[in-house]
Image (cartoon, helix red, strand yellow):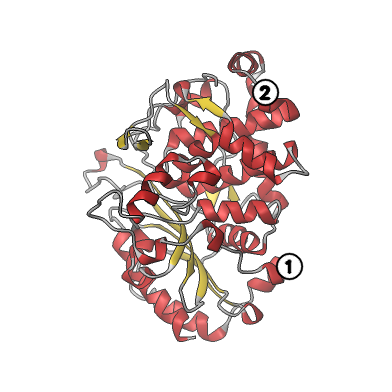
Amino acid sequence: MYTAIKLLTLPLLFLILSAFLYPIDGYERTGIKRLKRLELIQLGEIKTTTPLPSGALRSWNDISLNLQALNQDSLSTFFKEDVQLQKDISGLFRGLDKSYSLSVVDISDPAKVRYAHRNETLGYQPGSVGKLAVLVAIFTQLEKIYPDSWENRMALLKNRSVKSGVWGLTDEHTVPIYNIEKNTLVKRQVIASDVFTLYEWVDHMLSVSNNGAASIVWREALLMAAFGNEYPELTEEQALAYFKETPKKELTDLGNDVVNLPLRALGITTDEWRLGSFFTRGANTYVGDKGGSIGTPLGLMKFLVMLEQGNVIDEASSLEMKRLMYMTDRRIRYAQSPALKEAAVYFKSGSLYKCDRSKGEPCGKYQGNVQNFMNSVIIVEHPDNCRYMVVLMSNVLRKNSASDHMYLASAIDKIIRKG
């Protein structure tokens, strides 16, 4: 366990949560304690007024990759426009703000993949969707430490505990803390003394989109890159000394490389998806910003395709990352569409807004008048094997676009299902 530096939420910018993820029977595999509570709810041992949707009840062992049979195919194979699908998708955007951008890949029949798009190369601030790059970063470093043992990678995630310190402060999003012995659940902000396993920090980063957790996971990936095979035995004191004694430029370059070079290895260009700064400001004590952050529907769709192929690092890593994206609780925005209730969804949502109240214009939460990014990344798997992937990004000023995202989800689902 070790302490690091204070994280302050970026002023006027708000990164939003998704929902609880990972299959509910995953506690024994991962040690993520909140999963035990979900398992007990499903068994009827804990009562709840908000039962899980039917699409959220898959076992971890039921989750699989959809494009393994095509894992040797180049990315360009998946981005050939289907005339009818493109016509139908384009028709959805009449009357909607021009800032909406989209990439859709229908993989219901892997032998006949269908693609449609709208402004798919337009860049947006990715917000919390960028945490998927941090997920790739830590799994990349795990593979470098244990290239020949998936079991050792899993054991490190499950058994290594690290302290928040001030890195985990001051995100307003709470994290779920479940005490198995007392059967109590507390949802609160992360405090400096909190200790979680690497798996739990990753889960907090994705399931409730906690910004402090994202910075901690990124910090761990950086330390893995710096210490290599020595990382599993790294002490708190050694980590602190490293951050204090290493020049800031060196830390900045390494931190930037850790999250971005794995994306380049996937064929995603720097203009298609990159991260330039940690998710909370306290990290800047040691690690500076570099290059800015950007995401495009095409860049993020490349990631989803490679994930389903099993080509993000390796097959085992791709599958585990997909499990970590699986939604097992309240669905929001795009994923909240009633059309997806029975579907398994693998989802990450994010928003980032900025207000300038001197303009005298309406401005509020998710309704920024300077920036108002809202992004959704999703894999949908219906029980009848209708399967597809969507990346939807928007920047509609002065409007909460959540309802539009949900409307588009239902409309896109209808189009895909008609074939």
Q: Which quadrant would the N terminus be assigned to in this image? A: top right
Residue 15 horizontal side relative to residue 124, left or right: left
For label 1, count other residues whose C-alpha is less than 10 Å away and answer few (under 14), some (14-19) or many (20+): few
- Residue at 71% x, 71% y is 70
Q: Position of residue 283 (x, y in %)?
A: 51, 26
Q: Position of residue 246 (x, y in %)?
A: 67, 17
Which comes sooner in the sequence, label 2 or label 1?
1
Task: Identify residue type, mark 1.
Answer: Ser
Task: Identify residue type, mark 2.
Answer: Glu
Between residues 137 and 146, which one lies in front from this camera angle?
146
Label 1: which secondary element = loop
- Residue at 49% x, 38% y is 200
Q: Which residue is mark 2?
A: 233
Between residues 333 and 14, which one lies in front from this camera angle?
333
Spatial distance from mark 2 to mark 1, Cα to Cα?
A: 39 Å
Q: Which residue is mark 1?
A: 74
Q: Position of residue 136 (x, y in %)?
A: 61, 46
Label 2: which secondary element = helix
